[in-house]
Amino acid sequence: MPQDLDALDRLIIKTLQSNARTPFSKIAKEAGVSEATVFLRVKGLQQSGVIKAFRAVVDPQKVGKSLSAFILIKADPKKYSEVANLIKDLPDVTEAFDVTGPYYLICRVDVLNKEALSEVIDRMGRVEGVLSTETAIVLKEIKENMGLNL
């Protein structure tokens, strides 16, 4: 169920999406409230699940993962749950989505090179219940979504 967010919640979320290390004192000053109010709001947003986590966003290329790709997977519907659980746990899978349409699962992988991508695709193809895969290599990232527009 969507949570009702007031202007302060939206300001806090927008600010933290832009930079999760923004001091609460700075947010409080901008909002015209106390730092304690911001702290309590953030705590509430975390407890309600609106804010899922605070994390460092790492550039894959800067750590040697110079190839990104999306792998679309068709699976046996009777084995889909097992397929999804095994695929999501593969180390190079950075995102996985259950989708509608001709494919059951779409995964983003970030790997070192073409050989590593080939290994990931082969590993996925060996998962019992995977019927086929199709791969789209990312040539250039045009937009990276680092937050929601509220």
Image (cartoon, helix red, strand yellow):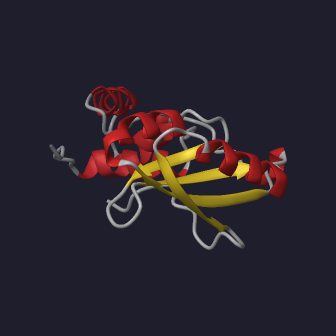
- The x and y percentages for residue 21 are 58, 38
Q: Residue at x 29, y 45 (%)?
A: 9
Q: Residue at x 57, y 35 (%)?
A: 55
Q: Nearer the viewer, residue 60 or 15?
A: 60
**Which image quarter: residue 80?**
top left
Task: Using residue 142 as the reference point, say whether residue 12 is left or right of it.
Answer: left
Q: Nearer the viewer, residue 6 or 122?
A: 122
Is 75 placed above or below 52 here?
Answer: below
Q: How many marks?
A: 0
- The x and y percentages for residue 65 are 79, 49
Q: Quadrant of the N terminus?
A: top left
Task: Using residue 3 as the reference point, say whether residue 90 is left or right of it.
Answer: right
**Which image quarter: residue 149?**
bottom left
- The x and y percentages for residue 92 are 67, 42
- The x and y percentages for residue 51 are 37, 37
Q: Quadrant of the C terminus?
A: bottom left
Q: Residue at x 41, y 61 (%)?
A: 103
Q: Is residue 113 visible?
A: no
Task: Using residue 59 as the reference point, say whether residue 17 is left or right of it.
Answer: left
Q: Is residue 33 visible?
A: yes
Q: Nearer the viewer, residue 43 or 35?
A: 43
